[in-house]
Image: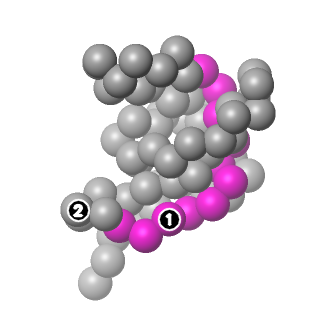
Amino acid sequence: MSAQHKFAVGQTVRFSPDLGQGTPGSGSFKIVRLLPESASVLQYRVKSQLDGHERVVREDQLARS
């Protein structure tokens, strides 16, 4: 049985990049798509509310806005 995503498509979340990830991408993001598990971690495709940039992030990098 696979884990359930904690966030839903269309939901606004806060993204916190890993230390050393080098991307100034923290802030408000909207969930665009739920992605399958990778290495037992749920992933999401999110879009920045600031610049429209999309990225793939792990669930543990997200928090409710």
Percent x, y for residue 3? Answer: 33, 70
Task: Tell me the SS state at disc 2.
Answer: loop
Q: Residue at x 58, y 52 (%)?
A: 45
Compare residues 26 and 6 and report the one nearer the observer: 26
Residue 33 inside the magenta-drawn segment: yes
- Tag 2–tag 1 contact (CB < 8 Å): no
Bin the neighbour count of mark 1 within 10 Å (Cα to Cα): few under 14, some 14-19, many 20 and up.
some
Return the residue at label 2: 39
Q: Is residue 42 magenta?
A: no
Placement of 20 over or under 48, stated as above or below: above
Relative to 26, 58 lies left or right: left
Q: How far apart, in angstroms, are the residues tagged by discs 2 and 1? A: 12 Å
What amino acid is labelled 1 in the image? Answer: Leu
Residue 18, image quadrant: top left
**Residue identified by numbered label 1:** 35
Q: Residues within 10 Å of mark 2 (few under 14, many from 20)?
A: few
Residue 9 is drawn in which quadrant?
bottom right
Q: Which residue is drawn at 56% across and 42% down?
A: 55
- 35 vs 63: above or below: below
Q: Could you tell me residue 19's position as x and y percent?
A: 29, 18
In the drawing, does residue 9 fall left or right of residue 43?
Answer: right
Quadrant of the rendering where the C terminus is positioned: top right
Q: Is 22 on the left-hand or right-hand side of 30?
A: left
Range covered by the magenta-colored residues: 26-37
For image coordinates 32% across by 77% down, the residue present is 2
Residue 11 vs residue 25, the one in the foreground: 25
Report whether residue 12 is seen. Answer: no
Magenta span: predominant SS is strand
